[in-house]
Each structure stands twice: as structure tokens, then as C-alpha cells.
Amino acid sequence: MISTALFWPAFVMAMATVGLYILTFLARKKLVEVGTAKMSDYRTYENEVPESRLWHNAIANQFETPVLFYAACGFAMLMGMNDAITLVLAWGFVLAKCAHIGIHITGNRIRHRAPVFGLSLLLLLALWLRLALGAL
């Protein structure tokens, strides 16, 4: 029987992405309402205002390393690698990515965002190495 323990960090990561889409919609709606942006700016995104581009980039980030995370969770479940170490790595990645999202959509300070991204990347690498060792 496949354990679903790793489903939950993947679920939280997916819901963070959905939440980011909702926040992006609301932020863009407000930009249009106050006249900073026009609806037509979102037709091709070529003339997207910087305040909106920030949200666009935050969403784009959720289709980079998180894709590898979802794959790792799926493989770990199939391989029966639902031990404490694997779960700690998975939850650590999710927490780091959620912090990364928060930093990105608030102050977007690179000096804060880069170390959190680095941490999430190290956790993801450790998760994949754990899977590779388990597959031997």
C-alpha cells in the first residue's frame, strides 16, 4: 500500500501556488482600478507594468523547482520512501518556498530572497539524492 504522507507537502505547495494566482488576480485588478495598468496590458503582457510583473514572476517561479519537487514526492511514494528524513526534507522545501513566495511578493529584497531560494534548492537536492540512494 502506498503511504500518502508525502501527499500533504505536495498539496500545501500546490495550494500555495493556487493562492498566489488568487493574490495575483486581486493585485492586477487593483492596478487596473487605480489606473496604474490597463486591462489590455494583460492581453500579451508585453506592456505589463513593473508592479504586475512582480506577481507574474512569482507565479513563474512555481513552475521551476516545485515541478522537480512534485516529481520527487511521486517517486518517493512509489518507492515507499516515506520515512522521517524524506518528510523533513519535503516539508523543509515547502516552508522555504512559501517563505520565498512571501519575500517575492512583499519587499522582493534579493538579499533576503536569494538565501531562502538557496535553502530550498539544497533541500530539493538532498531529497533527490535521498531518492537516488534509496533506489540503489
Image (spheres, rainbow, N blue to C red):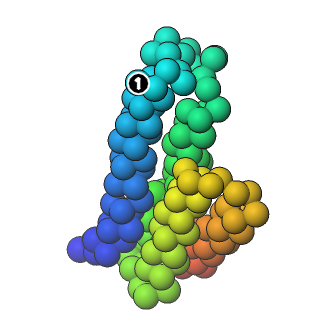
Q: Position of residue 119 (x, y in %)?
A: 66, 71
Of residue 50 and residue 94, the one placed in the foreground of this image is: 50
Q: Which residue lies at the image location 51% right of the left edge and 76% below the top edge?
A: 92
124 up-or-down from 14: above or below: below
Q: Which residue lies at the image location 52% right of the left edge and 59% below the top edge?
A: 102
Quickly name the residue at label 1.
Answer: 33
79 up-or-down from 14: above or below: below
Q: In which quarter of the image is the C terminus?
A: bottom right
Secondary structure, mark 1, is helix
Q: Residues within 10 Å of mark 1 (few under 14, many from 20)?
A: few
- Left or right side of 41 for 27: left
Q: In which quarter of the image is the N terminus?
A: bottom left
Of residue 82 and residue 25, the one placed in the foreground of this image is: 25
* Amino acid at circle 1: Glu
Residue 129's image quarter?
Answer: bottom right
Q: Position of residue 121 (x, y in %)?
A: 66, 65
Of residue 127 and residue 42, the one placed in the foreground of this image is: 42
